[in-house]
Amino acid sequence: NPFARAHYLLAAHNPRQLPADGGYEVAFAGRSNAGKSSALNAICQQNALARVSKTPGRTQQLVFFDLVPPGSPEPGTKFLVDLPGYGYAKVPQELQAHWQAFIQSYFNTRQALKGLVVVMDIRHPLKDYDRQMLGYAVQRELPAHVLLTKADKLSRGAAMNTLQAVRMELSRAFGDTVSVQTYSGESKQGVDEARAVIARWLEL
Ligand code: GDP
């Protein structure tokens, strides 16, 4: 599992703090509490890579995890990027605007960005924020992949129905560059499927 090598590199609060643009990276987005940190940790087989928080939505930064160990021939060329969570209205409007601008410029200009994973609670899929993030990716013709998390919270039949409904809606709204799967951190269902998509984008 190449993701098991992931380690924290840096957190960028503004565009100047981003690492050099030239490698391959995949960004993770999701509303607060959707299960993004849990999914990142499971994909990387680490318990505490991304923080799993009970009071989410406060850290406003792009966190870079490097998949190539320091000292290797090409460190700093393959990244997973944890985008700030969203959905808690506690952030002042000015800061929201700053974030909006930062994320938008990141999506518009970042050459290394090869794909986007959007994490959604299967019980509350495709909210405005999710559509906005998918829109940024599709606009740039980047592929996107949706993880419908917490599938264990629904019966198998209900989870499959939601999967089908979301798949149809994604296809209608964004065309065929967006794929979708169910995921459960409880049973680890869907971890391999997610890894395969991301590994392909990163050419791992
Ligand atoms: P984030 O804010 O998107 O990073 O969400 P977290 O990863 O911190 O998860 C939010 C809460 O949902 C935590 O209490 C997790 O334990 C829980 N959670 C995350 N993924 C799953 C899942 O697949 N199934 C269940 N049942 N709970 C989950």
Image: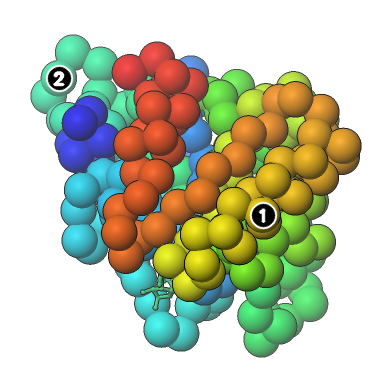
Is 126 positioned to the left or the right of 201 in the image? right
Judging from the image, what secondary structure is the residue with disc 2 in? loop
Query: Residue 48: which numbered mark, if any?
Result: none
Which residue is at 71% across, 26% downward? 177
Q: Residues within 10 Å of mark 1 (few under 14, many from 20)?
A: few
- The answer to whether 163 is drawn above or below residue 198 in the figure is below
How many marks on residues?
2
Quadrant, the C terminus? top left
Secondary structure of residue under mark 1: helix
User: Which mark identifies residue 72?
Assistant: 2
Identify which residue is drawn at 73% across, 69% down: 96
Q: Please name the residue that numbered disc 1 is placed on.
A: 161
Instruction: Describe residue 105's horizontal placement relative to residue 61 as left or right.
Output: right
Which is more foreground, mark 1 or mark 2? 1
User: Where in the figure is residue 95, as x and y percent of width and height?
Assistant: 70, 71
Which of the colour schemes (rainbow, by chain, secondary structure, one colour) is used? rainbow
Q: Is residue 93 above or below residue 80?
A: below
Mark 1 is on which residue type? Asn
Ligand 1 visible in quadrant: bottom left
